[in-house]
Image (spheres, helix red, strand yellow):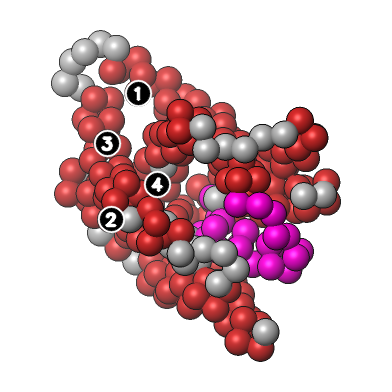
Amino acid sequence: MTVFEAIILGIVQGLTEFLPVSSSGHLEIASVILGSRSLPEESLMFTVVVHFATALSTIVVFRKDILEILKGLFQFKWNEESIFSLKIILSMIPAVVVGVFFEEELEQVFGGKIVFVGFMLLVTAVLLFLADKAKNTDKPVSFKDAFLVGLAQAVAMLPGISRSGATISASVLLGIDKGRAARFSFLMVLPLIIGKIGKDLLEGSLAYENEQFGTMAIAFVAAFVAGLFACSWMIQLVKQSKLTYFSVYCLVVGLLAIISGLSM
């Protein structure tokens, strides 16, 4: 992987992790466009690095929320923070089940299958359009809502289905306040990212060579900076009901991906 590829793919990951346009789908498309055919081990290492960068940017943006949650948990009482943490755990269950029991099947839909990615982007476009038309409310996230949003997150493990788009859309369509929907969507993925990184490290499945350090570091910085911008921007966009722009974007990119894939 060249320095140029590392910068481009890092920025793509940082932006699309938070913007509702599917980070995995865009990385698949970008890899095909750039002609990147890295070894699977190197690709896995890159994925871990950029996901850690976006996780760190989430922590920075929501540092006050995270500190409040941790303070509440250490009180060892049934309080608002404990309830919120249980909802986060509940929302993780569907994605964990899919990741543990269907990992091999999931991997088969990755690897340059941009026609499939294109169709999934069309699904994302429809979800965003419907969510943008929903009325805003003051409803908080219930335990039932947390699990249903978790199901949306599990489906979003497919390349082309935006994780933030699917979870925020599901939340809004369930009648949850748009601000709370964005907050819950971004916080619920943190444990999963950290858990996935820990799992890969413990299994020793990450191949690393010293000459990769420079490009990986560049990709990390690019993803982190782009993630800071995208996370903050996305929160405001959800509150202002401007998801239709991303719906149109996903529609266009999805159609282009399908046409491009079929013409190869």
Label 2 SS: helix
In this view, the mark in front (4 or 2): 2
Give the residue displayed 60% in from the left and 68% down from the top: 112
Tag 1 residue: 69
Residue 199 location (% of width, % of height)? 43, 34
Which of disc 1 and disc 2 is earlier in sequence?
A: 1
Disc marking residue 231: none
Identify which residue, 162 or 134, lies in the foreground.
162
Query: Residue 7, relative to residue 196: is it above or below?
Result: below
Furthest-top residue in this view = 75
Identify which residue is drawn at 38% across, 61% down: 105
Quarter assignment of residue 187: top left
Q: Which residue is mark 4?
A: 185
Residue underneath mark 3: 89
Q: What's under tag 2, amino acid-wise?
A: Leu
Asked if residue 23 can be seen in this view, the reply is yes
Marks 1 and 4: CB-CB under 8 Å?
no
* Residue at image mark 2: 151
Alpha carbons under labels 2 and 1: distance apart: 23 Å
